[in-house]
Image (tube, rainbow, N blue to C red):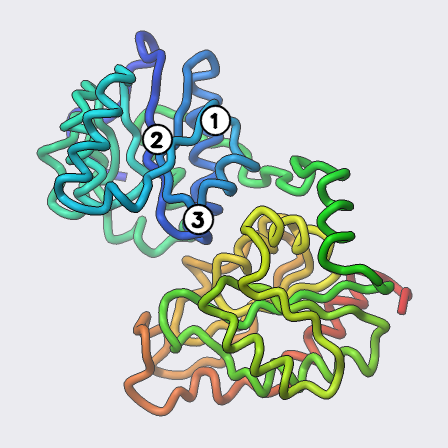
């Protein structure tokens, strides 16, 4: 990868590092190998992640950082940015590594008086960085885990193992407590469905089809089926639960992210649109069916060895649009049987001859 003349950070003299995390759950999951690479390069340094509250648990649970600094909503104004920078300045960080691409991240690091500021030269922020990595056309086409790893590699951090064994980091006692809180009568199988997606309707398969898949799965497997998502997914999840002819446990908007992670970690199958919860399931190596329409599975597909992508080849996909400007054929062509058949295959593959 071509980079500007001054790229690699020094190995010595960096005792406190501020990492600006990404703002979305899926993106945060995909930055974890890069964070692990930074940790391996600076094992004795104090690592702090600056993150929005809704992604903080991703870094808290799955990274080796020492501290999470919450980017609170009160800082989401021009004056708030400089108040945040003033607070960070008191911490005397030696370096800032900006995984977030926005110019705002560079402005905060500069205003905080952090002498070494590193990241991709995106959003016209190259002049604000002391160590700038060129974002080439080719790097924008790779899986996003590699996108972030390529950046920190250019900064002098060797690549970490892409398989972070995230499930091993979860606490078994907390997992049991979470199941007991939400799923009182856990049956042989636990199947999770995440029908939401933050970035627009073009990423969302149809609620009535999710309901029909749930009906067919329940008819073939002794399963408890749960619906997961954020508060904004509550309406969609309610529609699925109302349409389905079998009992579904609607937990959308009723769990914290941490609780959702622990529930997903105990699923035997997870079915989802391209969403943050899909990335969590894949990274936990849960058998995952990922339904893709407007987005690109090459760059944002789920991690894990048990992930299957369901997608129909159409000329206008991936369009990366929030709403479909045409006839939504990329999603309409994905049938209930397409998803159900793949679900059966995945369950049989991962569970052998078990029912």
Spatial distance from mark 2 to mark 1, Cα to Cα?
9 Å
| Residue 290 horizontal/vertical position (percent) | 56, 67
Q: Helix, strand, or loop for circle 3?
A: helix
- Residue drawn where x is 54% and y is 51% of the image: 257
Can you tell which of label 3 and label 2 is closer to the viewer?
Answer: 3
Q: Which mark is residue 65?
A: 1
| Residue 119 horizontal/vertical position (percent) | 25, 35
51 left or right of 264 in image: left
Q: Residues within 10 Å of mark 2 (few under 14, many from 20)?
A: many
Q: What residue did someone put label 3 on?
A: 54
Spatial distance from mark 3 to mark 2, Cα to Cα?
16 Å
Q: What residue did someone put label 2 on?
A: 19
Q: Helix, strand, or loop for circle 2?
A: strand
Rendered view: 64 above or below 354:
above
One can see residue 145 in this view: no
67 left or right of 79 in image: right
What quarter of the picture does the N terminus occupy? Answer: top left
One can see residue 288 in this view: yes
- Residue drawn where x is 9% and y is 34% of the image: 127
Where residue 80 sits, quadrant-wise, is top left
In this view, which residue lies farthest toward the top? 13
């Amino acid at each position: 990868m071509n980079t500007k003349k001054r790229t690699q950070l020094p190995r010595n003299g960096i005792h406190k590092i501020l990492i600006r995390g990404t703002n979305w759950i899926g993106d945060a999951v995909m930055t974890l190998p890069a964070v692990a690479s930074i940790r391996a390069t600076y094992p004795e340094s104090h690592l702090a992640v600056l993150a929005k509250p809704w992604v903080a648990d991703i870094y808290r649970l799955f990274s080796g950082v020492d501290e999470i600094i919450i980017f609170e909503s009160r800082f989401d104004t021009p004056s708030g940015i400089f108040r945040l920078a003033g607070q960070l300045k008191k911490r005397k960080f030696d370096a800032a590594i900006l995984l977030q691409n926005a110019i705002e991240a560079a402005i905060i690091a500069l205003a905080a008086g952090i002498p070494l500021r590193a990241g991709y030269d995106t959003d016209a922020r190259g002049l604000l960085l002391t160590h700038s990595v060129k974002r080439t056309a080719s790097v924008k086409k790779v899986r996003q885990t590699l996108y972030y790893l390529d950046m920190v590699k250019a900064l002098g951090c060797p690549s970490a193992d892409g398989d972070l064994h995230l499930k091993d980091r979860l606490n078994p006692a907390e997992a049991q407590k979470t199941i007991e809180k939400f799923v009182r009568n856990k049956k042989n199988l636990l199947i999770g469905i995440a029908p939401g997606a933050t970035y627009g309707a073009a990423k969302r398969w149809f609620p009535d089809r999710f309901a029909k898949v749930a009906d067919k799965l329940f008819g073939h497997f002794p399963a408890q089926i749960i619906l997961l998502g954020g508060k904004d997914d509550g309406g969609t999840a309610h529609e699925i639960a109302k349409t389905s002819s079998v009992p579904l446990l609607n937990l959308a908007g009723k769990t914290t992210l941490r609780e959702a992670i622990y529930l997903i970690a105990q699923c035997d199958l997870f079915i989802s649109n391209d969403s943050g919860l899909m990335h969590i399931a894949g990274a936990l190596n849960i058998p995952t069916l990922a339904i893709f329409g407007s987005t690109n599975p090459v760059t944002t597909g789920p991690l894990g060895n048990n992930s299957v992508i369901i997608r129909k080849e159409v000329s206008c996909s991936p369009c990366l649009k929030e709403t479909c400007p045409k006839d939504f054929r990329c999603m309409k062509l994905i049938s209930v049987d397409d998803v159900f058949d793949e679900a059966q295959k995945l369950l049989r593959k991962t569970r052998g001859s078990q029912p």
